[in-house]
Image: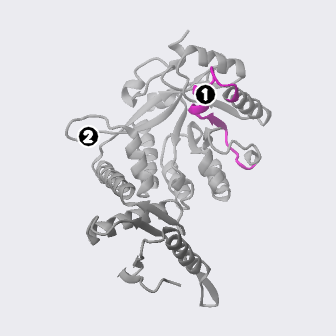
């Protein structure tokens, strides 16, 4: 299977290193693909069942003297981690320079993950709110908003950008822990502020894909709402279209469990990914949240216009409501209203505010009259 001049070593119980002559990169890639196939196709009998396995390979092309072996192994390990992050059972090939860049990115993400862990442990997260307002002249009976989580630097008090935090949570499988924190903190805040709870119609909380696929997450929701004064019907959980379609069975089970508790559901980032309407009957959500990349181009793209119109029409036909993200100006807002979109959200309507300040202001529906 392997060329005669190959070197093979074992680094740990499930980690191996293979050194191939790089004179024929295409042939080496074929060797590695063959290794993956051999592992994937292997079956071992155990207790009357057949057990299968999978592998991930990170490969680095390099020239003699370009780096020492410790550095090469570190780069290969990072490439292997990328292969795992992409679903496993695959080969990740990288040149030396690109592998070094990947290691730098991985290291930066790891630093954010460490900061995220400390913030969760020490309470350095803050709840922010952004309004979701009606576009058809009909408002909810109270405030409709989305909860946004922001990490605060404990030394400077500076609010950290959310992008690296979310990316680190997803990369290092901390999403469900972060989502539990958001849900618990949101409910706890409203429990301490019954006057704000009385103003609330719908509070949206975004969940990561890993929480939707976590079999213990519905149990957490059930236990937390059982001891809360916040009615489940006031909370809307947002799950992304991509994560729902990627594992439709898990999404359906999660939605059914959330619905059984009385929670509302929204399909977030709708129209940016698969944008297929065939599966919608199997996803019992209350809202389609139209992705901002489609809404942003509404004034200059016939395709975006057609997508938004289609989503609004199909939503009405199956008794669902629509929310448009990235409503950045009055022209987009008015156009969305003409297309029949029910609600809008973005800086053009309301800027995120710390939750305590948010409930001191008039509702966003009263800000533009």
Which secondary structure lies at badge 1? helix
Please identify the quadrant where the C terminus is shown. Answer: top right
Q: Residue at x 56, y 54 (%)?
A: 212
List x then y, in percent, for residue 254.
Answer: 62, 54
Residue linked to disc 2? 153
- x, y (%) of residue 173? 44, 58
**How much space separates mark 2 and mark 1, taking CA atoms?**
33 Å
In the drawing, does residue 275 fall left or right of residue 118? right
Determine if residue 159 is in view. Answer: yes
Residue 162 screen position, x and y as percent: 39, 39
Looking at the picture, does residue 139 appear above or below residue 321?
Answer: above
- Residue 241: image x %, image y %? 62, 45
**Residue 352 higher or lower than 124, as above or below:** above
Task: Tell which of 223 and 45 is nearer to you.
Answer: 45
Is 113 left or right of 3, judged from the image as shown?
left
**What's the magenta region?**
282-303
List the single residue furthest toward the left.
155
Report the residue marked by disc 1: 295
Is residue 260 found left or right of 366 in the rendered image? right
Q: Residue pushed farthest right?
A: 317
The residue drawn where x is 67% and y is 38% is 286
Residue at disc 2, secondary structure: loop
Using the rendered view, name the quadrant where residue 187 is placed.
top left
**Residue 171 vertical position relative to residue 127 in the rendered view, above or below:** below
Q: Looking at the image, can residue 222 be seen?
A: no
User: Considering only order in the chain, which callout, 1 or 2, is on the residue closer to the N terminus?
Assistant: 2
Q: Pointer 2 and pointer 1: residues touching (CB < 8 Å)?
A: no
Judge depth for marks 2 and 1 and give the one in front. Answer: 1
Q: Between 179 and 94, which is closer to the camera in this rendering?
A: 94
């Amino acid at each position: 299977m392997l060329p005669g001049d190959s070197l093979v070593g074992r680094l740990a119980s499930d980690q191996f290193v293979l050194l191939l002559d790089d004179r024929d990169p295409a042939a080496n890639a074929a060797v590695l693909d063959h290794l993956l196939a051999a592992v994937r196709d292997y079956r071992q009998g155990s207790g009357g069942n057949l057990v299968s396995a999978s592998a991930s390979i990170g490969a680095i092309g390099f020239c003699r003297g370009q780096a020492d072996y410790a550095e090469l192994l570190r780069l290969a390990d990072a490439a292997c981690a990328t292969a795992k992050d992409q679903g496993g059972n695959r080969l990740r090939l990288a040149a030396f320079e690109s592998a070094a860049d990947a290691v730098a990115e991985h290291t930066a993400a790891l630093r954010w993950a460490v900061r995220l862990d400390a913030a969760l442990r020490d309470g350095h997260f803050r709840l922010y709110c952004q309004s979701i307002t009606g576009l058809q002249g009909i408002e909810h009976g109270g405030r409709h908003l989305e909860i946004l989580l922001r990490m605060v630097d404990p030394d400077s008090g500076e609010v950290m950008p959310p992008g690296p935090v979310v990316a680190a949570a997803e990369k290092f499988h901390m999403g469900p822990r972060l989502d539990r924190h958001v849900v618990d903190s949101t409910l706890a805040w409203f429990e301490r502020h019954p006057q704000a709870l009385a103003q609330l119609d719908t509070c949206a909380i975004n969940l990561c894909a890993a929480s939707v696929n976590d079999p213990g997450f519905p149990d957490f929701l059930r236990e937390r709402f059982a001891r809360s004064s916040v009615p489940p019907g006031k909370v809307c959980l947002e799950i992304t279209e991509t994560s729902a379609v990627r594992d439709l069975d898990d999404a359906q089970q999660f939605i059914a469990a959330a619905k059984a508790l009385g929670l509302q559901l929204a399909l977030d980032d709708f129209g940016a990914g698969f944008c297929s309407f065939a599966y919608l009957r199997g996803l019992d959500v209350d809202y389609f949240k139209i992705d901002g990349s489609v809404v942003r181009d509404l004034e200059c793209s016939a395709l975006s216009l057609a997508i938004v119109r289609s989503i609004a029409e199909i939503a009405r036909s199956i008794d669902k409501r629509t929310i448009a993200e990235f409503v950045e100006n009055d022209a987009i807002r008015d156009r969305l209203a003409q297309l029949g979109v029910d609600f809008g959200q973005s800086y053009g309507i309301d800027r995120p505010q710390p939750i305590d300040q948010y409930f001191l202001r008039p509702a966003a529906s009263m800000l533009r009259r």
